[in-house]
Amino acid sequence: MSDTTDTAADGPAAAATDGLRVLHRVIMPAERDLDVLRLYVDGNAVFGRRSVDLAGAAEQVLAEQDTGTGRPAAGYRPSSKDDSAEIIGRRSIVVPSGARVSFCSYFNAFPAGYWRRWSTVETVRLRLAVRGEATVLIYRSTGKGHLERIKALQFDSDTSVERSVDLPLAPFIDGGWYWFDIIADGRTAVLDRAEWCAATERTTPGTATIGITTFNRPKFCVEQLVALAGAGDVLDVVDEIIVVDQGTDRIEDHPDFPAAAAALGDRLRVIDQANLGGSGGFARAMHETVEAGRSTYTLLLDDDVILEPEGIVRAVTFADLARGPMIVGGHMLDLYNRSVLHVFGETIARYRWWMEPAPNTFLGHDLAHTPLRHTPWLHRRADVDYNAWWMCLIPVDVIRKIGLSLPFFIKWDDIEYGLRAKEAGIPTVSLPGAAVWHVPWHSKDVMTDWQAYFTERNRIVTALVYSPYERGGNMLKESLFITIKHALAMQYSTAELMLLAIEDALKGPDDLHPSIVTKMGELRELRAGFIDARAESDLDAFPAVRRRKPPRKGRGVAPPKDRKAMIRTALLGAARQLKPVDQHPRTHPEAVVPHVDQTWWLLTKFDSALVSSADGTKVAWYQRDPRRFWSLIRRANALHARLMKDWDSLSARYRAALPELTAPEAWRATFAKADKPAPAAKSAAAVKAAAAVEAATSARVDVPAVSLDSAADAAPGASPSPVPEPERPASPMSEQPAPPAAERSVPPAAERPASPASEQPAPPAAEQPAPPEAERPAPPKAESGGAG
């Protein structure tokens, strides 16, 4: 370890004259958002005055905090609980006399364990510029979460002094972080800037093309463009921003778009195409990046995220200095509860073939309540199988080697791509300090609405290609149980979608590209025939809740206590289907079931119930239908048996077709089918009305609250009126006509449902296995408890 003094160029794209490359800059929040402050600074800190003159602002704070006269104070004074460090810029903070702040925080601690494992860097240099009187204490942690103090630096100067310390990465093979605390142990101190650097021959950074797929979220997407335009020197590593607009409410019609476009200039390009889902939009961004031949990487971003722009530079720098080609992803923070780290890393449980948190990590960790310093599991390096495409940097050379996304529309496309890359020897790293804020899964009905089809079909296809177990391990048995669970819970449309997914998987790989264009229309028409798929925004839209008989002895429904009780509950629920449903529950719901309570074992006790959605915006009337239940059960058993029988031959077909399915040539043909005619200009009144509707629906957290059910309304081939409620035969549905200019879509592929393993019913007259471990905390109970 050495202590030196030096001066070097600042900025991510600055070619270092001394052979140093900035790896990780210490930053403050870009917005004055108190909810995210603890992700940047651990300690008592506030946002200081707004000023473009940061030096002047610092001088003013210094004068006020020291003496009130503008002259430096002579000595130390104890701090009080009212003393707060003041953030005065993106890189600067003022620490009052006697106070202490720490940068042992998510965005500012240096993730040494990841650089040790995956990069060519062997020594990192902490470089600081400080004025005033301060002690800087440098710390490290181990992979076990143990903390060690490494060195102390003293500063005492009225002008900014630069000091640096070289620190080895050798001790971090299992994980760990570096960080520093700053203590104003005399007069007030100012941290002007700090960065973690490394000596390297790779001083010229790579560049990225950002690909954003959007569907009818113009306000949110334009706000993301505005944020990128204001990201300063972060744009030095951005060649182009491609927005693939697949909606009918176009971003170019948003009133704020012209300003964003003017700020970004030639960097921005909008591509209009019919809705091909997240996988089609991201495949287009990948393809355009490769064809342009300018960028080293493509960076995929969801349209419904808030980005910490510094993560772009960190991801590019990490990939530049990696030991070999590597996919670098960002973490997911909770958009609704912004100090919560929702996902730290993910893997696939091979035997169940379902996504789960990476080993020794946990979902939904609140860093404001329990910060990095006090969370041992965050100090252990987490190795992943894939990174979701809410933020994912993919080298162009990797795309050339393994191809584009599979034509999945949504769900599992990012997982499959990570697994494909891994088989090709290309790892994925979920990099701490690079992250986006994204809508959490528990606010989505992704396991019960139309998305259930894509989840089931794409899970099966991915298992057919990559599962190491005979016939997919436990996946088929689990799938059967989940289908039966939905049928017991009167979620007949969901069960039907799952069976349609199996039918389509059985068709083989040739169906994937054609169906990405037409499938949403089929799903929309199918769901229109099910009463449980019809939702209203008001409970009063339904008849009054009346139960003909009160609960026995006034008792409520208790959850099954053990495996035997679960089997008994499932069998009793199936036995209820032998009884006809009288007229009363068809005219009056028997109960109101909030989303948090909607479990299969509760719903199976009713003949009808009003059930709310995950986002709390609508409610559906579930009604028991014995004829439909037994039809679903018979077909579920037959289809799962056929899939098990044909597993090996189907697996060989999908594996053989994979290179062709992901080739640019196949995707070009699909893009051609999705070309949209030049859009007609909207009137000013139409633009204003669309903006007003979106503003009203997104007031909660500035996120357009696109209804998941209404997102299918404009699907190609959709019937304009409800169809009768038929009993579907086992044969696949006929293909729908080619799509019009646009269709209503899904949220991008990165969202993840809760694990389907929890609360699985035993199928009637079938062996019930030991219930699998709960792999996602607090799953939506209406589903049964993923990610990716």
Image (cartoon, rainbow, N blue to C red):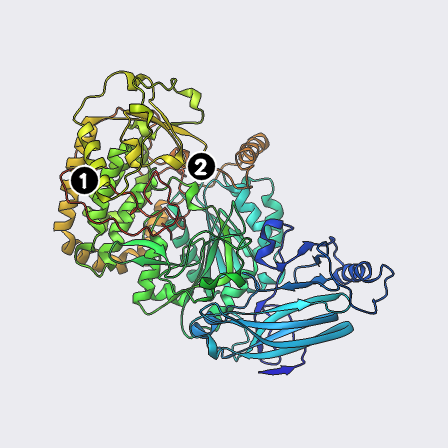
- Residue at 16 percent across and 53 percent down: it is 647
Single out the residue that lies furthest toward the front. Answer: 553
Q: Is residue 58 left or right of residue 38?
A: right
What percent of the width, then of the height, locates residue 146?
49, 70
Figure quadrant of the N terminus = bottom right
Q: Name which of mark 1 and mark 2 comes first in the sequence.
A: 2
Residues at circles 1 and 2 in contact by the CB criterion of under 8 Å? no
- Residue at 56 percent across and 50 percent down: it is 225
Q: In this view, does 359 lie to the left or right of 239?
A: left
Q: Which amino acid does label 2 sit on?
A: Asp
Residue 21, quarter of the rendered image: bottom right
Figure check: 533 above or below 321: above
- Tell me, for residue 615, which label it has, or none: 2
Q: Is residue 87 visible?
A: no
Single out the residue that lies furthest toward the right. Answer: 69
Identify the secondary structure beneath mark 2.
loop
Which residue position is annotated with label 1? 763
What percent of the width, then of the height, locates residue 655?
22, 59
- Residue at 17 percent across and 31 percent down: it is 630
- Tell me, for residue 132, which label it has, or none: none
What percent of the width, then of the height, locates residue 486?
27, 37
Q: Which amino acid does label 1 sit on?
A: Pro
Q: Nearer the viewer, residue 150 or 506?
A: 150
What percent of the width, then of the height, locates residue 158?
79, 71
Q: Rounded to the nearest whole Å, what is the CA distance between mark 1 and mark 2?
A: 30 Å
